[in-house]
Image (spheres, rainbow, N blue to C red):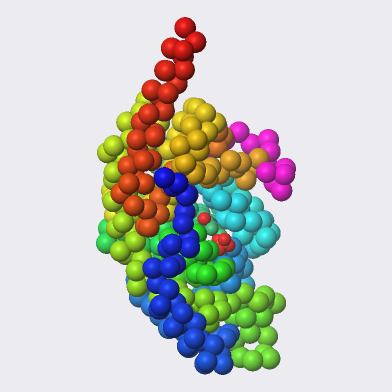
Amino acid sequence: MKVPFLNLKAINQRDEVELLAACERVIKSGWYINGQEVKDFEADFASYCGTQACVGTANGLDALRLTLAAWKVQGVLKDHDEVIVPANTFIATVLAITDNKLVPVFAEPDPDSYVITTESVKAVLTNKCRVVIPVHLYGQLVDMDSLLEFAQLHNLLVLEDAAQAHGAVLSSKRAGSFGHAAAFSFYPGKNLGALGDAGAVTTNDVQLASVIRALGNYGSEHKYIHQYQGMNSRLDCIQAAMLRVKLANLDADIQIRRAIALRYLAEIRNPVITLPLITDHNRHVWHLFVIRTTQRIKLQAWLAENQIETLVHYPCAPHKQLAYADYAHLQLPITELLQEQVLSLPIDPTMTDVQITQVIDVCNAYMAATTLSEKGKL
Ligand SMILES: *Cc1c(COP(=O)(O)O)cnc(C)c1O
């Protein structure tokens, strides 16, 4: 049986009736930008995350960019200030920093959990650092208790990149409620996905929220009065309506993802596969199930031969990209090792038990296959 990496069509088909009804409601409202749907979703999502405020944005990259830009407008950040960021993140996190004329300082992740640690942040801290961006990579929360304590000690602002971690819980707090602010993406493939681009910032700082809202609305709080040189980055009413439908199912989907991950963790047994390290089940929402292997090309080909689609997140770290040639000299051995070894297995709330079993069996059969072909050579 074919096991697609992520079956978005099947995921959205489950809510087809409600999504269509919500579409119809928006179409018939005649109100498509800055409407009630957006206000309602923002209230729902702030309450879900446990924050005072939520501001919808056009996408996750803009949620990050606008937050850093708002801190510049407020005078707490200035050009060339340094921002600590995981070296193995998706490039958007770094783009948000450089786009604001700030300087990225790359921290190494832990090789087993893939997220940064307070120790790795401490190792790169300079006296120019003003912000740290913990990325809850693949859906697993960074150890926020320890990082927040460190940030407070060194006067760092904390901007969570929660684009992959909607709903993850630590010390009964949800992703997006730990830092001074948090950025979310609702790109269709994320655990909470719109039917197009969408994003949001969550924060308990209502003043910051209103600056972010103004910056994303041409720098304006009142029509035709422009306080800042802003941009146009708003959450569309139609996407807000889709997200309200899908938010209602987020926790159930997280439970399904966890059940799949638990089976993979318990049943994949193969010396060539290193399973991800997790400390606490509530802390991980399994946006991606990422293993490590020194035989990635062969294992990926074997899985593909057996109808299992896999992807690599990410094959090239930001400092190795042409766009960041200025940082190519950096030595980040853990990040560079991960970039060679990580492989993402299918994980999707519409997977059947048969498909999950197939992924496990094919992973476990891989060694047997190589041993067989080696025997064949003898
Ligand atoms: C998806 C993602 C983003 C960017 O979100 P978009 O909505 O695609 O702009 C930022 N950071 C991380 C970690 C992401 O996974």
Query: Residue 251 vs residue 69: left or right?
Result: left
- The residue that appears at 50% across and 69% down in the rendered structure is 194
The quadrant in which the N terminus is found is top left
Task: State which image quarter holds ligand 1.
Answer: bottom right
**x, y (%) of residue 104?**
61, 50
Tally of numbered discs:
0
Instruction: Give yes or no for residue 330 being in the magenta stretch.
Output: yes
Q: Quadrant of residue 116?
A: top left
Query: Residue 349 vs residue 324: left or right?
Result: left
**x, y (%) of residue 277?**
35, 40
**x, y (%) of residue 117?**
42, 44
Whether residue 297 appears in this view of the structure is yes
Q: Nearer the viewer, residue 123 or 209?
A: 209
- The residue that appears at 30% across and 64% down in the rendered structure is 252
Q: Nearer the viewer, residue 217 or 6?
A: 6
Q: Residue furthest front?
A: 1
Query: Residue 328 vs residue 65: left or right?
Result: right
Whether residue 68 appears in this view of the structure is no
- The residue that appears at 61% across and 59% down in the rendered structure is 96
Q: Residue furthest top?
A: 378
Q: Nearer the viewer, residue 14 or 223?
A: 14
Q: Main secondary structure of the magenta part?
A: helix
**x, y (%) of residue 7?**
46, 57
Q: Quadrant of residue 52?
A: bottom left
- The residue that appears at 42% across and 17% down in the rendered structure is 372
Q: Which residues are magenta?
A: 321-335
In this rendering, the answer to whether 279 lies above or below 168 is: above
Instruction: Give yes or no for residue 168 being in the magenta stretch.
Output: no
In this rendering, the answer to whether 24 lies above or below 184 is: below
Q: Nearer the viewer, residue 49 or 310?
A: 310
